[in-house]
Image (cartoon, helix red, strand yellow):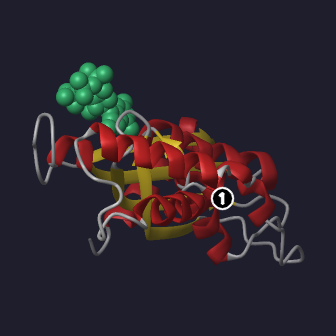
Amino acid sequence: MDKEKIQRAVRDILEAIGEDPDREGLIDTPKRIAKMYDEIFEGLVADPKDHLDIYFEDEKHEEMVLVKDIPFYSVCEHHLVPFFGKAHVGYIPKGGKLTGLSKLARVVDTVAKRPQLQERLTSMIAETIMDKLDPHGVIVVVEAEHMCMTMRGVKKSGSKTVTSVVRGIFKTDAKARAEAMSLIQFGS
Ligand SMILES: Nc1nc2c(ncn2[C@@H]2O[C@H](COP(=O)(O)OP(=O)(O)OP(=O)(O)O)[C@@H](O)[C@H]2O)c(=O)[nH]1
Ligand SMILES: [Zn+2]
């Protein structure tokens, strides 16, 4: 990431809004923002598939594995302000291709750390798991609050956007889909 360029751009923005970028409180802000962008956009230079090592290949579990309530923070690509919430990720492994549970959360993090759309975030998580683990199916549900809808614009604080993507068996098997949805809602 070109941190020098970010610093120059932030300085320009501060000037453009009528601020003095050399005043004490702002003097280090361009540097801080460059460092922050390096962190919150680190998913741009990472491949989420790299997290999905296949472990436990001798296991024969071919039933649902669901990790729910995975918190994430992302940035809306329209306004560059945060959207954040929870992702629920489930899959039905095939041929013993199981991955570590934390790896599913790592996929969510990597995909979230880019300027994003909630719809794309949801489908990228599902595609990553389909491509790497070749499971019977994947279901991903994401619920999020968009700051661009709460702190500005239409100002609907508390509103939530829910997106879901199903792949493989979840597309055709309504029972499997209903089971996943009820597990996602269980306890929430
Ligand atoms: N589909 C989708 N839309 C999003 C997402 N994040 C933000 N948006 C929407 O992107 C749209 C951008 O609309 P524009 O009319 O170009 O921008 P705007 O004038 O700032 O729109 P308002 O937010 O309505 O004030 C808005 O309706 C946002 O709510 C997202 O993840 N998915
Ligand atoms: Zn937005």
Residue 177 at x, y = what percent?
Answer: 47, 48
- Look at the image and tell me whether residue 144 can be seen: yes
Q: Is residue 46 left or right of residue 73?
A: right
- Look at the image and tell me whether residue 122 can be seen: no
| In-front residue for pair 172/9 | 9
Q: Against 172, is 178 above or below?
A: below
Q: Against 26, is 13 above or below?
A: above
Residue 147 at x, y = what percent?
Answer: 25, 49
* Point 55% across, 37% down: residue: 171
Q: Against 72, is 101 above or below?
A: below
In this view, which residue lies farthest toward the right?
58
Q: Quadrant of the C terminus?
A: bottom left
User: Ligand 1: does it lie within 8 Å of the C-beta at label 1?
Assistant: no
| In-front residue for pair 88/96 | 88
Res 158 quadrant in image: bottom left
Q: Is residue 71 left or right of residue 132?
A: left
Q: Ligand 2 appears in which quadrant? A: top left
| In-front residue for pair 42/24 | 24
Q: Is residue 160 left or right of residue 110?
A: left
| In-front residue for pair 17/1 | 17
* Point 84% across, 68% down: residue: 54
Q: Secondary structure at mark 1?
A: strand
* Point 46% across, 58% down: residue: 30
For disc 1, the marked residue is 92
Residue 99 at x, y = what percent?
Answer: 75, 70
Q: Amino acid at mark 1?
A: Ile
Count how many numbered circles sit on residues in the image. Answer: 1
Residue 181 at x, y = what percent?
Answer: 39, 55
